[in-house]
Amino acid sequence: MILLGDMAVSDRNFIKYTSGIDQQQVDSAFKSINPKRNPESTAFILAKKIINGYAEDWWEYSMPEKMYEMGIYSPLQLLIHFCSSIADINPDHDYPFLFGTIGALISLLTAKIDDPEDADKLDRGRENFKARAEDYRKILQTIFQMREIREEGENLSIETHIPSSIDDTLKYTPTSLKVKKLGQIFGRGVGTVSAHRFAERVDVEGGVYNIFQDHQKAPSTLLYTLGKSYSHIPSDNISVALHRDRSVIVSAKYNPLLEFYDGGWHISDISSAKDLVNHCLKTHTKLRLLDGNPNVSEKVLSLAYYMASHWHSGILAIINCDCAESDGILERQKKWSENSTAIMKEILGAGTQTDLYITNIRPKEEEDDKDANGFGRVLLTNAIQDGATLFYPDGKFHSAGRVVTKFKDLALADPNLGTGNRAAMKLSEYGVVLKVSEDGAIRLYSGDSNGNKLLTEGFRIR
């Protein structure tokens, strides 16, 4: 059996830099999720829930509050420890790129096991899992080798799906290219390539099994409607994409899971982050009497992720805006912000409806669909200016460019906090706040003025 105790805990301390939790928290979480099941079965079940888009809660016998208190918002935080504990992965050799660990994680996520609690099926699934993990490790190595190649001053990019979506009887598409040329011509956003021969060590080649013939699902197009990213990934596949900014992103359908940038892997898992934001919105004392909308967290997180993935900083706050205004924690709105808000309402407001709701943004369905507008793109442009962008819990846009005052006392609580994070923490007394940093991190703040901090930096993604 592949158990968490196969390797000394001290050997796996480096995984904490990716997961944000230590082995003791991992062991406690596995027991809390289902005390009757061994960690290996739980790991396979959690992986299946992730690849199925979290159709059901992942914490099972536990409660989300208990997980959040331990600093666990995503099951990936547990699974990356699980995969690093496999006995034949040497952590000294695996660090810092974690080829073996991430290869094992992709194999775990794509494992074909109908019932992980059935011992016979788990035995067969385990052998399949370990065999594929080695191939996926080599595929990752090939993609990271491409990451170091520059052609005429340009970085390469590529996207592949694991396992390949093409017919399994084909080892690769009939026409193939050397991997360097493949990245130059069929880079990310142009098509999706087959990685069947990426695991080979000599004459690495790849074929193309999908070319994007329209841009309806391109990131720049989805931004206008704040649509879900990675919609083109088959539901039972994992995408590994090398971007031209040299980041590497491992994604499931609609959900970025892991991202390599700034010298290490970072857990994203926007779907789990949405559950955390919804929990904070439901439990915050200043929001309990206000109307809410369950879709507001998804849209605001989409905006935050677009900001982070393009290295833009800003503050997005879902708060009791009227209460914050009456308490005088916001400076008077600057002229440019007033005018920008007025223009958005005049141009984007439908007819006499001048209130703008981030939850009403949706894709165009017809050419003359007037309700589909560029509000997402306009919001991004406003959100990256100085100050915070404010929304009510029902998704109604309040204003952008709002400067927070009266937060000097927070410097005493944590002198390492910068101005932006202190402003976000002050706003969190009135609701839930996402602080997007230039380094790509998204932090969540939620609490109240009585010192009842639900979460301070509940997650750090991208």
Image (tube, rainbow, N blue to C red):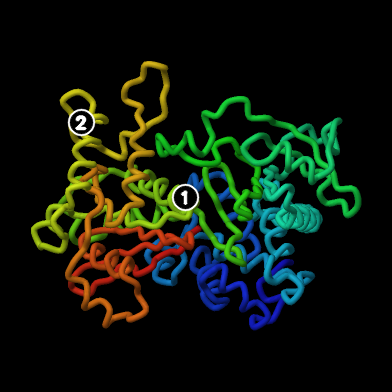
How crowded pointer 1 is (Cα within 10 Å; few <14, some 14-19, many 20+) is rated as: some
Q: Of tags 1 and 2, which is closer to the observer?
A: 2
Where is residue 365 drawn, in percent x and y? 42, 21
User: Do we see residue 126 in this rendering?
Assistant: no
Which residue does the image show at 65% across and 43% down from the upper left?
A: 237
Where is residue 441 drawn, in percent x and y? 46, 61
Residue in the foreground of this view, choosing between 403 and 172: 403
Query: In this view, which residue lies farthest toward the front?
Result: 152
Which residue does the image show at 32% across and 45% down from the upper left?
A: 296
- At numbered mark 1, what does the secondary structure look like: helix, strand or loop? helix
Q: CA distance from mark 1 to mark 2?
A: 33 Å
Position of residue 155 relative to residue 81, above or below, is: above
Q: How many marks?
A: 2
Point out the image quarter for the N terminus.
bottom right
Where is residue 209 drawn, in percent x and y? 74, 32
Position of residue 329 relative to residue 112, above or below, is: below
Where is residue 54 drawn, in percent x and y? 50, 48
The picture quadrant where one finds residue 442 is: bottom left
From the viewer's perspective, tell me whether residue 265 is left or right of residue 294: right
From the viewer's perspective, tell me whether residue 54 is left or right of residue 105: left
Residue in the foreground of this view, choosing between 121 and 250: 250
Residue bearing mark 1: 271
Residue in the foreground of this view, choosing between 181 and 359: 181
User: Do we see residue 451 in this rendering?
Assistant: yes
- Residue type at numbered disc 1: Ser
- Residue type at numbered disc 2: Glu
Along the polypeptide, which appears first: circle 1 or circle 2?
A: 1
Residue 346, numbered label:
2
- At numbered mark 2, what does the secondary structure look like: helix, strand or loop? helix
